[in-house]
Amino acid sequence: MSLKKAIDFKNGVITDAAYIEVSNANIDFTNKTVNFNVKTYLNKEVKDAGLGTILPDKYYSVGQGMNYTIPPMPTPEQINPFETYFASGDLKTNCETYLLTLPEYSDCTIIAE
């Protein structure tokens, strides 16, 4: 699975299907943390051709017991993102599911590959 979305880069470049891929995902069950990168390509064809990303990679850290997190940890009345999204299942799929909960990625479409 991967994600796609329409992006207007405000510089004359517009894509209807930017290809968004999770990479370098790591999970630490002891500390209940997940770290992963998100790469954004102009489209899947650009990615398949081995060309570079159109946006800088983004880094996400999610979990408990961390000195920092991006985005910030929820307040106690909110959900625990590690337990909710990462405690079981496929890590890459879980990262993509988590991304869909963030405002920046909420309008993405899932690509079944």
Image: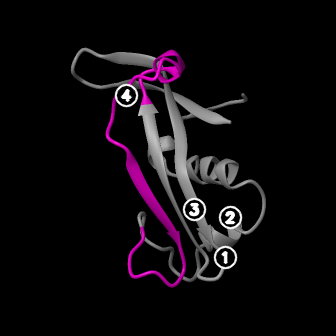
1 vs 18: above or below: below
Q: Crowdedness of circle 1 by 10 Å Cα count: few (<14), some, many (20+)?
A: few
Q: Crowdedness of circle 4 by 10 Å Cα count: few (<14), some, many (20+)?
A: few
Q: Residue furthest left?
A: 11
The structure residue drawn at horizontal position 68% and vertical position 36%, both measured from the top left corner, is 1
Between discs 3 and 4, the one toward the N terminus? 3
Q: Position of residue 55 (x, y in %)?
A: 33, 35
| Residue type of the residue flagged with mark 4 | Gly
105 vs 111: above or below: below
Instruction: Give the Cα separation between the discs numbered 3 and 4.
Output: 22 Å
Q: Position of residue 3 (x, y in %)?
A: 58, 34
Q: Provide the residue span drawn in magenta.
A: 41-69
Secondary structure found at label 1: loop
Q: Does the stretch in magenta take in 54? A: yes
Does the residue at mark 3 contact the one at mark 4 (Cβ under 8 Å)? no
Secondary structure found at label 4: loop
Residue occupied by mark 2 = 86
Residue occupied by mark 3 = 26
Instruction: Give the Cα separation between the discs numbered 2 and 3.
Output: 11 Å
Instruction: Give the Cα separation between the discs numbered 4 and 1.
Output: 32 Å
Q: Is residue 17 left or right of residue 32?
A: left
Q: Position of residue 92 (x, y in %)?
A: 65, 49
Residue occupied by mark 1 = 29
